[in-house]
Amino acid sequence: MNANNASPAPARVINGVDTDALFATIDAVKADPGLAEFQFRADNRWLDGGHNRSTIKGFRGCRQEDQTRTAPFVMDADEPPVLLGRDAGANPVEYVLHALAACLTTTMVYHAAARGIAIRGIESRLEGDLDLRGFLGLDDTVRKGYREVRVLFDVDSDASPEVLRELAKYSPVYDIVSNSLPVKVQVRTSA
């Protein structure tokens, strides 16, 4: 058979990740670090009380605006009745737990695939402790957000817990919540 009639080699897939595409992406970023710059965006609108809605659609990556998403992702946030809401969605600090769980899981899966480590299943439980006195402005010594977040993973893999924990720590959301970063808040009024 000549090269023109040869079938392409099947992609090597580990943990549902096309590792050929993963390594091609890594090589492209090594050759051109500007491809690694991404900007993600969310738009939010207050609805009533504690209820607000975010839509996420566009993002910029690899020096261009993404054109693959045809519809936005819509996420409602609210508070439970005990916090004066109507429970129309998870509350914002619960979304932080979701974002952390999702990113730690994805990161572990991708980095394991890159190392040839098979993962057959992952489940996790996250708990965060928060004291409302900080949010309510009742005690300046009490943090407004979580004091601590605990993550427990149950992973079906032959890799050691130490290796898997190290892989998960490449997570961007883990970095966001475990390290301080600048957040610039601007407010415009219609008045």
Image (cartoon, rainbow, N blue to C red):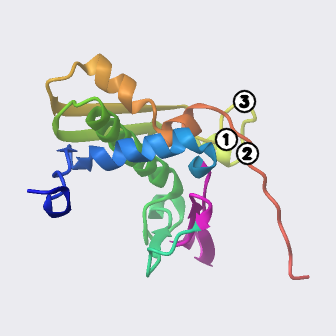
Helix, strand or loop: magenta stretch: strand
| Amino acid at dot 1 | Gly
Tag of residue 137: 2
Image spot of residue 17 (x, y percent)? 26, 48
Dot 3 alpha-carbon crowd within 10 angstroms: few under 14, some 14 to 19, many 20 or more: few
**Frontmost residue, 69 versus 47:** 69
Residue at 44%, 81% in the rendered image: 71
| Amino acid at dot 3 | Thr
Dot 2 alpha-carbon crowd within 10 angstroms: few under 14, some 14 to 19, many 20 or more: few
**Relative vertical location of residue 184 with respect to residue 126 in this rendering, above or below:** below
Residue at 31%, 17% in the rendered image: 162
The residue lying furthest to the front in this view is 2
Tag of residue 141: 3
Dot 1 alpha-carbon crowd within 10 angstroms: few under 14, some 14 to 19, many 20 or more: some
Residue stretch rendered in magenta on the structure: 37-64
Report whether 24 appears left or right of 113. right
For label 3, the SS is loop
Q: Verify CB contact (< 8 Å) between mark 1 and mark 2.
A: yes
Image spot of residue 4 (x, y percent)? 20, 62
Q: Quadrant of residue 84?
A: bottom right
- Say if residue 146 shows up in the picture: no
